[in-house]
Amino acid sequence: MLNDEQIKQILIKTKIISASEFDKLMIEAKKINKQIEDYLIEKKIISTITLYESAANFFNVPYIDLKNQLIRNDILTSIPESIATTHQLIAFANTDKIIKIATLDPGDLETFEFIKKKTGLDPEIYLTTPDGIKEALKQYHKNLHAKFKDLTLKKTDINDTENLKKIAEYLPIVRIVDTLLEYAIFEEASDIHIEPEEKNTIVRYRIDGILKNIMILPKDAQLGIIARIKILANLKVDEHRLPQDGRFKISTKNYKISFRVSIIPTFDGEKIVMRLLSEKTQILNLEQLGFQPNSLAIIKKNIAKPHGMILITGPTGSGKTTTLYTMLNVLNTPEVNIVTIEDPIEYRMPRINQSQVNPKIGYTFAAGLRAFLRQDPNIIMIGEIRDQETAEIAIHAAMTGHLVLSTLHTNDAVTTLPRLSDMGVPSFLIASTTNVIIAQRLVRKICPNCIQSYKLNKSTIYEIKQQLNIESIMETLQKEKVIVDTKKGLEALLFYRGKGCKQCSNSGYKGRIGIYEVLEITETMSELILKKASSLELKKQGIKQGMLTIVEDGFIKSKNGITTIEEVMRVTKE
């Protein structure tokens, strides 16, 4: 856990070896692909305890040996197990005012601040060994399986509501669910998946768009966890055969999170997926979303129009809702009446009349839209155009003096036009009412703490050339003044990636940003739509007008060190 430079400084300061001896050992360790710390211990140049005692002096913190130390359960669990495991730290003692924490990284200030807020105690930091942490972490699981044996249910009890409610209040179950929710908030996860298997229950988080395994729980815990979440979300505890949907909130001084719960029956039990929606999320401005200057100018021009339609397209989880809300935030002034119909309402916005569909009682997007038109709106936001009826009402609203914002599921901006035609909307209406179409994907941003430059190797270049028109992309990069010359080719360009560090959980990525293509419906484009031109002809005209494709926008952002080539390729593969 100590980095190479720290180990070198520690060894020189304690006069164990000289700088030149260390450099020589470093070369030897690299040759056999070993970490220098492991190599020094293996060669008996220094013992683990001596190294970490010396490191404690170096960092000016006390050293603690955690081996064979029993930690009181209430102190141990004051830090959730998932945080202790990920950040390699343990709470081992406390007083009225302080909590003593053993760690491998005394510089992990963000986590210490989180612990301070959570416990209300000042962290006192100690350094320990990796083995010490490993042994202490086992104490979390020491009595867990034994405790869960009490939860084993007879088949007759499964539909017994009272029994399930008792199990949901069982302390280990409450602790596990609280830990899962708290850690998901801390890690800024967008979704929590609790998945039953034959012998275990797996918990995964979606962080920056990628699912990651977090922990494996004993099968005995499954029913209790499901019952606990059902009670939180006000769902039927004894219903195991039908899907259920609900939601609940967690509010503290530091955050206000709404959890959207979906439960479905599977072969090994019920699977839960929870979507996390921060109610304190600051709505971004258009500049922060990551549009290129020309695209941004087109969007600003078109949202200032009093009527017409703005469509945002892309797959599920591509940030369409965030883009919609950002536009609404720009438009949200006292002079206009804004109404939205959504499924579900994801973020609350002041001064905006937000309505949620309810198909069970016949309140669909189309029914809501009809009612909205009697509410004297200036701006209407429709969560999604799913069918012909909604599409027709939306287009007629745009034609009769309303600004309509909505989303559609298509792969790029151009294919949105034939998609509307397929829904039965006449071409002349599409041509006359659509202002602009934005297609988007989300890519992970490179972690700023461990960013480094590199050149693409031959195999990566070959792979890119197989999938993309590199000559066209290089010309776009030159036109956008990202590169000076196209003659040298991809192999001459510097790109960027994250090496992986503590701040990004060694992934090399932190946060996400959009890559976009913005298609403005100009007079020429309208004429092509009226002629029922093919997608290829429409795309050619879009590019002629200066439209950047999603891939081109991705390459500009990867060349500028915002994301990586791999990320762009991952999200744009068709």
Image: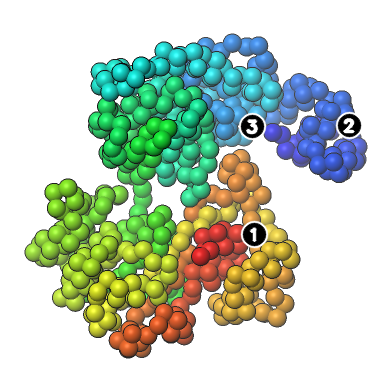
Q: Which residue is mark 1?
A: 496
The amino acid at mark 3 is Asp
> Where is residue 7 shown, x and y percent of the image?
77, 34
Q: Residue at x 33, y 72 (%)?
A: 419
Q: Residue at x 13, y 49 (%)?
A: 361
Q: Residue at x 35, y 66 (%)?
A: 312
> Where is residue 225 shown, x and y percent of the image?
38, 27
Q: Which residue is mark 2?
A: 17
Above or below: residue 571 compared with residue 93: below
User: Comparing marks 1 and 3, which lies closer to the viewer?
Assistant: 1
> Residues at badges 1 and 3 in contact (C-beta under 8 Å)?
no
Give the CA distance from mark 1 to mark 3: 27 Å
> Residues at badges 3 and 2 in contact (C-beta under 8 Å)?
no
User: Comparing marks 1 and 2, which lies closer to the viewer?
Assistant: 1
Q: Secondary structure at mark 3?
A: loop
Q: Which residue is mark 3?
A: 105
Q: Determine whether, in the image, residue 74 is placed left or right of residue 109.
A: left
